[in-house]
Amino acid sequence: MEEKEINSFYQQGKKWIATQHGDRNMFAVQGREEEEKQITDYLLGNIENILLNGTQLILNDVFKLIDFEVIDNDILKHLVVASLCQPVSKAGMIDYLKSYFDEDIELHKIYRYLDRLHNTQQDKVQQISVEHIQKILGGRIGLVFYDVTTLYFETDYSNDLRERGFSKDGKHVQPQVVLGLLVSRDGNPLSNTKVIYISFQNGSKNIYL
């Protein structure tokens, strides 16, 4: 191939590149990228705290839409949102709420509220949940499912609440409780059940409600 023909192809290539991508100087682009990186690093380096609260904003609206705000207690909202975003222990939940949502809640207040929720507000929460599901399904719940799971305790001692027995986690030597949940066809929770105690006597399983 002659030099004149090579130069012709070279010029055609340059023209095509300029048409498709623009006539850019790659060294100038690299310089701008480095400058932008320096500016970004400077800005991020001067931010004391970043709140990733997008999920909180969404779930707060869902919480309100379901009508759970009828139960006038912010701790319930924080427990629901945190449990959905980051299922951890109650102590871990305190750190999570503080780190990501800037919500400062004391651990003892959560435990006190859980007692109140169980003793006085459980039926109300379940009623709100069922009414919301009925609203979604046009006023009728045609099919429900019931399922259980086991929870074990890191202790060797049994009592009236927990007994040794079957464990889905293989923790048969540790006290267990079994929790049940009633859900709609689409998996929406309708009601929880009383704790079911399971123990083994003579190789048979006995269930106490």
Image (cartoon, rainbow, N blue to C red):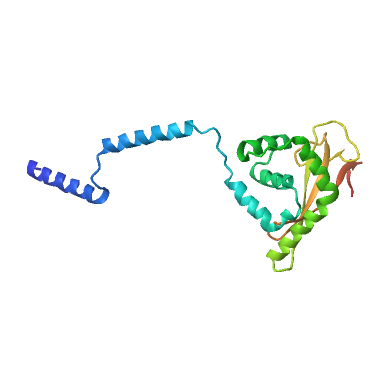
- Would you say residue 184 is visible in this rendering? yes
Whether residue 14 is situated above or below residue 157 in the rendered picture: below
Q: Quadrant of residue 40?
A: top left
The quadrant in which the N terminus is found is top left
Q: In this image, 86 relative to 42: left or right? A: right
* Residue drawn at the location 62% of the way across and 41% of the way down: 101
Whether residue 19 is situated above or below residue 33 in the rendered picture: below
Q: Quadrant of residue 94?
A: top right
Camera-nearest residue between 42 and 206: 42
Camera-nearest residue between 35 and 186: 35
Whether residue 115 is situated above or below residue 130 in the rendered picture: above
> Which x, y percent locates residue 173?
83, 34
> Which x, y percent locates residue 155?
83, 31
Q: In this image, 24 relative to 54: left or right? A: left
- Would you say residue 195 is visible in this rendering? no
* Residue drawn at the location 27% of the way across and 35% of the way down: 27
Q: In this image, 194 relative to 49: left or right? A: right
> Which x, y percent locates residue 127?
79, 58
Camera-nearest residue between 92 and 190: 92
Q: In this image, 22 relative to 46: left or right? A: left
